[in-house]
Amino acid sequence: MPLVQIINLLSNFTTASVFAALFWLFTDALFLRFEIKIFLKAIAFGLLTTAIILNLLQLLTIANTPFIFWLQSLGLWLLFASFILDSHSKLQFMAILAILILFFLKNHALLAVQASLVAATVLNLAHVTKHNDLIPFGVGFVLIACAEFFYFLERTKNFEGIAQAGTFLYIFASITLFYWLWQYLVIRFNLGKKIGEVFRPY
């Protein structure tokens, strides 16, 4: 198996694993306290996990699955919506942009802009609320946005080989998101407190 394919498989497996863990995180939080923004995050990461798994299967079977981009796009849109619903968010006006780009962009260009919107809203919340623990989550989506932009460049501008940089960025994004997740796993399991008291996955 070529090294490039091995790296692609590793990237997809790592990303799917972290997205699945985040899906579990927000689903687990719902059992203790239902909030619409947490519900949207759970659905979003469920869709993103499904999309990455389908992409992984596509790499293994050389089958074409046309719904992957739409699953990713819907997942990112719901994730963005969940953050602008936060009462501390100052970027609600960007919802108009999030809707408009659905009509003018597609494939990797669309995903790059959507991931950028998620990153912007998360980092804005980190700044406004002084919750610096949110910064790794935002940085993770900055890396995903850059990765999708590199995929876009190779597909449309013939920048040969640049997609591999995007593949590595997805691995780094997964590590960054797992670091964010790990902070809450420590609280959830090691301190023995209820989520409703000390665990707030935003």
Image: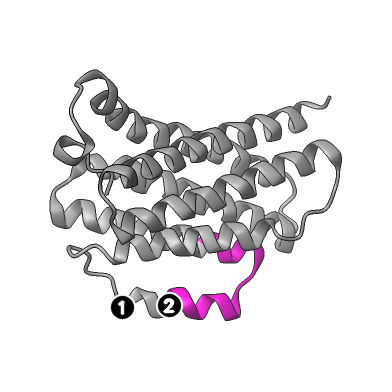
Q: Is residue 94 above or below residue 3?
A: below
**Residue drawn at (56%, 53%) of the image:** 47
Residue 57: percent from the left, percent from the top? 75, 40
Dot 1: element: loop
- Mark 2 highlights which residue? 97
- Mark 1 highlights which residue? 93
**Contact, mark 1 vs mark 2 (Cβ under 8 Å):** yes
**Outermost top residue:** 190
**Residue drawn at (43%, 40%) of the image:** 22
Measured in 3D between alpha carbons, the distance from the residue under mark 1 to the one under mark 2, in whole angstroms, is: 8 Å
Residue 102: percent from the left, percent from the top? 56, 75
What coloring was used for the rendering? one colour
Q: Is residue 134 shown left or right of residue 152?
A: left
Residue 30: percent from the left, percent from the top? 33, 47
Q: Is residue 139 above or below residue 89?
A: above
Q: In this view, does 169 lie above or below 146?
A: above
The span picked out in magenta is 98-112
Residue 109: percent from the left, percent from the top? 60, 64
Amino acid type at mark 1: Phe
